Structure formats: C-alpha cells, structure tokens
Image (spheres, rainbow, N blue to C red):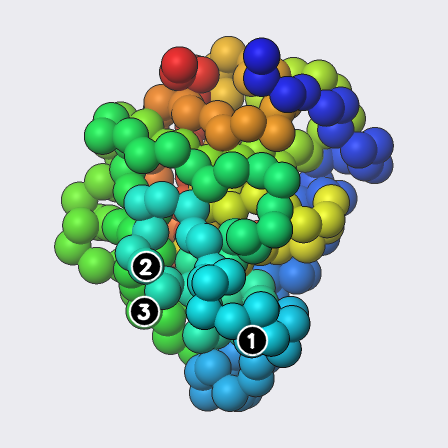
Amino acid sequence: MPRTLNPLPVTGQMARLACIAAALAVAGGAHAQQGGATKPAPGAFERAKEGAAAAPVLSSPLPAGAGTAVPAGSGAGYHSPNSPIAPLPRRNDVVPWSVLTDLNKKTTKDGILPVFNDAQKGMDKTTQRIQGFMVPLDAKPTQTHFILTSVPLTCSFCTPGGPESMVEVKAKTPVRYSLEPVVVEGKFTVLPNDQYGLYYRVVDAVPVK
C-alpha cells in the first residue's frame, strides 16, 4: 500500500514557491561564484568514510555519477543511499530526468538562465509524462499545484537539486500527496526566464498509474 502523509502547513502556494525560488537563487549564485564544483557537497566527508561500498544512489534514469560533483541546490540532485525512500523506478513511458538535467546555464543581468538544447526545445508545448517525488505547495491531502523532483526532499524547504531537477505541475485533476513516486501527464513547457527560477512546467496534468 502506498505511504501517504499530510503535507506540512504552509502559508500559501505563492509563499512556498517563493521559498523554493529563493533557495534556487542562492544556490545558483553560489555555484556561479565558485565557478563549478569547488566546494564539497554536504555529507561528503561522512560518505567518504563509508568507503566505496556506499556509492551514491541516484534516482533512475539519471546516469551513474551524475549530480555528485556539484554544490547542493544545483545539478541533477543527490539521493542518499541512507534514504528510507527508494529511488524512482525505471519506466519507458516517462521523460528521463537525464534529458531534463542535460543543459547549460548563462548569467545575465536578470540572473542565471537556462540554455535549452534541441531535445528540450522539441518537447515544448507537447504532451509528456513526468515521474518524480511530490513537493506540495498547499496544506491539503490532494494537490493541484505542486513540484515534482528527481530525488526526494530531505526537509520541507530544502531543494535537493537545481531547477533542472524540478518540474512545476498545474493539475487538471487533483493528485493525492504521497511519499511514493508520482507520474503525471500534461502539456509540457520550457521556461526560458521564469520569475521563480524554474525551468519546466506541466499544465492540465492528470495522474497516471
């Protein structure tokens, strides 16, 4: 039976989304100032002590080793091998996160913006299926506006990866909040300069088994 948990109380969808946006902006700015992976990710020392047997486990279908050499809050995201939540199962009917996270970024006066490749541009305004872990934006058992991420959250307001590892979802049919992976289908859109710093959105989404 899927595990369910009521979302933590929040002051509203916009406040929660603003918190995520602020975290993305701070993480993105730090990454740009560092010029890449010059600072060890949180917990790197503890993981190093555990040895090679405790290699990072990433949510499939990300390639092995992705997201482990960038600061927290950027890149594809890190799924701790100690997490009680299993990585995403492999499915052939969803967009792989490796496709969404494979992009470059540019720094402008407006901030750090995505540079989408041909594959990502080709999905714009098409119907797609996305699989991920739900970040609720409202304190309700069912959600019509939420975020899907490639790896589960470690706390209510922490971003596990960069904006390339998240998809904003606006659902036509309410989706029940769960700790288990969620799959939705809807109109996929790329966001070249979103006010909240997000890169992808799915609208008119419906849940898929």
Evaluate whether residue 25 shows in this view: yes
Give how far apart the Cα atoms at labels 2 and 1 are. Answer: 17 Å
The N terminus, quarter of image: top right
Give how far apart the Cα atoms at labels 3 and 1 are. Answer: 29 Å
Q: Is residue 160 left or right of residue 23?
A: left
Which amino acid does the dot numbered 2 rest on?
Ala
Which amino acid does the dot numbered 3 rest on?
Asn
From the viewer's perspective, is the residue at label 2 or at label 3 nearer? 2
Instruction: Say whether marks 2 and 1 touch (CB < 8 Å).
Output: no
Residue 122 x, y percent position in the rendering: 17, 44
From the viewer's perspective, is the residue at label 2 or at label 1 nearer? 1
Residue 168 x, y percent position in the rendering: 50, 39
Identity of the residue drawn at 57% across and 43% down: 152
Q: Which residue is mark 2?
A: 64
- Labelled disc at residue 48: 1
Binning the other alpha carbons within 10 Å of mark 2 as few (below 14), some (14 to 19) or many (20 upward) gives few
Q: Secondary structure at mark 3?
A: strand
Identity of the residue drawn at 51% across and 46% down: 151
Q: Is residue 77 left or right of residue 145?
A: left
Residue 158 x, y percent position in the rendering: 68, 54
Q: Secondary structure at mark 1?
A: helix
Identity of the residue drawn at 36% across and 64% down: 65
Which amino acid does the dot numbered 1 rest on?
Ala
Which comes sooner in the sequence, label 2 or label 1? 1
Evaluate whether residue 26 shows in this view: no
The C terminus, quarter of image: top left
Identity of the residue drawn at 76% across and 23% down: 6
Q: Which residue is mark 3?
A: 104
* Residue 196 vertical placement versus 70 (above, below): above
Q: Secondary structure at mark 2?
A: loop
Which comes sooner in the sequence, label 2 or label 3? 2
